[in-house]
Amino acid sequence: MKILFLIPKLNVSGGVAKIISAKANFLSKNNENNVAILTQNKGNDPLFFDLNPNVDLFDVSLKGNFFNILAAYKKQVESVLKVFKPDVIVIADNGLKAMFFNIIIKTAIPVVLEIHCSKIVSEKKNNTFFAKRSHQIVVKLRQLSIKYFSNIIMLSEESKKEWNLKSAKIIPNPVDQSSVHSDLSDKKIICVTRNNYEKGFDRIIPICKAINKKYPSWTFEVFCDEKGYFDILKLMKNNDIRNLIIHKSTKNINEYYLNSSIYISTSRFEVFPLVILEAMSFGLPVVAYNCPIGVKSILNSEFGFLIEDGNQNEFINKLEKLILDKEVRIKMGKNAQLESFKYNTEKILNDYKVYLNEIVYNELK
């Protein structure tokens, strides 16, 4: 089987890049399938995650206004289809150009759309009438475009309900299982995120400030690029934040999970927070805002605290509870690691492979 993935970027540390890299590696191992990935990396920038050498890479260049981008996307994707000749196309790009794929590109090749975002996700704060109206239009276009796909993968039941799709296939993201876990004794709180509005780095700042006043020996270790939507250093300076350490994104995150005691998430939007599952696989209890769709699909009171979105005081209170009571941390941590076993990589990726095979087989009948 020849599989072509369409993804925005592979040279970033995001969850989509990590998952598609893992899927490509799994599907292409032992040359079982021919796999290619089409990106918009703006050239041959180094990939962030390791990729099997037998995975083919294509890159498209998109510039100009929306209509120029659509035209360039159509032309370059059609060129790749002629060269690679896939049996199935998997779109893991939830930008409008990709979600209108079946409208702008006519092909008999079966197409699968993977939804990795909330329908209402926004990349910036919509605090003006024009911005709010523009966002409403984008949401409507997303809902319209998805109806043109007959093969859709959702990551959870919550996501399926949000998009109002009864026939979508649910295949959650997998997480590698850890054979070890943190002893939860280090006074470190960890967060792995991105510097954009969606992930809510700014919401970490008041939490750090409140905790530092009462528990100055506890530190926050946040993995997030300094450059991005927020001026991180300015936020820290203006709020006199002294207990927050910023790390660059890294592939070798496991040792940091093992040396931490609590994981936090302050995202404004999530569809399936892979980093929370990763933290759980190392036995970390979690405190997270209940942002639209994603977090509540995997987090419950046995191994974490799900906080009303934006309720900063409650977030701090629950974080204090974990700081003060190691026994609660240990109990929740054990439950968290057990829960993570449900997302076993081998099982989920085998299910994924079977699903793609069925689509190709049905197309050939």
Image (cartoon, rainbow, N blue to C red):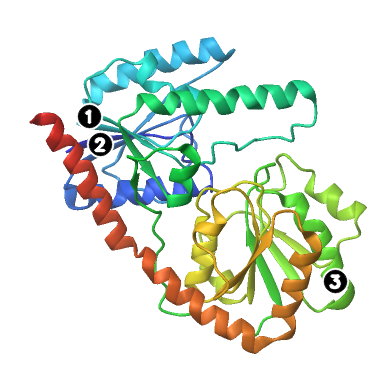
Q: Is 263 positioned to the left or the right of 317 in the image?
A: left
Q: Of the residues under marks 1 and 2, which one precedes in the sequence?
A: 2
Give how far across and how far down residue 227 sits, in percent: 71, 42
Q: Is 211 positioned to the left or the right of 292 in the image?
A: right
Q: Amino acid at mark 3?
A: Asn
Q: Is 158 positioned to the left or the right of 202 in the image?
A: left
Identified at 54% across, 65% down, the residue is: 299
When the figure is inspected, residue 50 is found, relative to residue 79, above or below; the finding is below
When the figure is inspected, residue 349 is found, relative to residue 9, above or below; the finding is below
Give how far across and how far down residue 308 sits, in percent: 70, 58
Q: Which residue is mark 2?
A: 3
Q: CA distance from mark 1 to mark 2?
A: 5 Å
Residue contact between numbered discs 1 and 2, judged by CB atoms under 8 Å: yes
Give how far across and how far down residue 343 sits, in percent: 38, 63
Front one among 278 and 52: 278
Kindly tell me whether residue 228 is visible in this rendering.
Answer: yes
Q: Amino acid at mark 1?
A: Pro
Q: Of the residues under marks 1 and 3, which one precedes in the sequence?
A: 1
Circle number at residue 86: 1
Give how far across and how far down residue 70 sits, in percent: 47, 14
Identified at 50% across, 52% down, the residue is: 272
Q: Which residue is mark 3?
A: 212
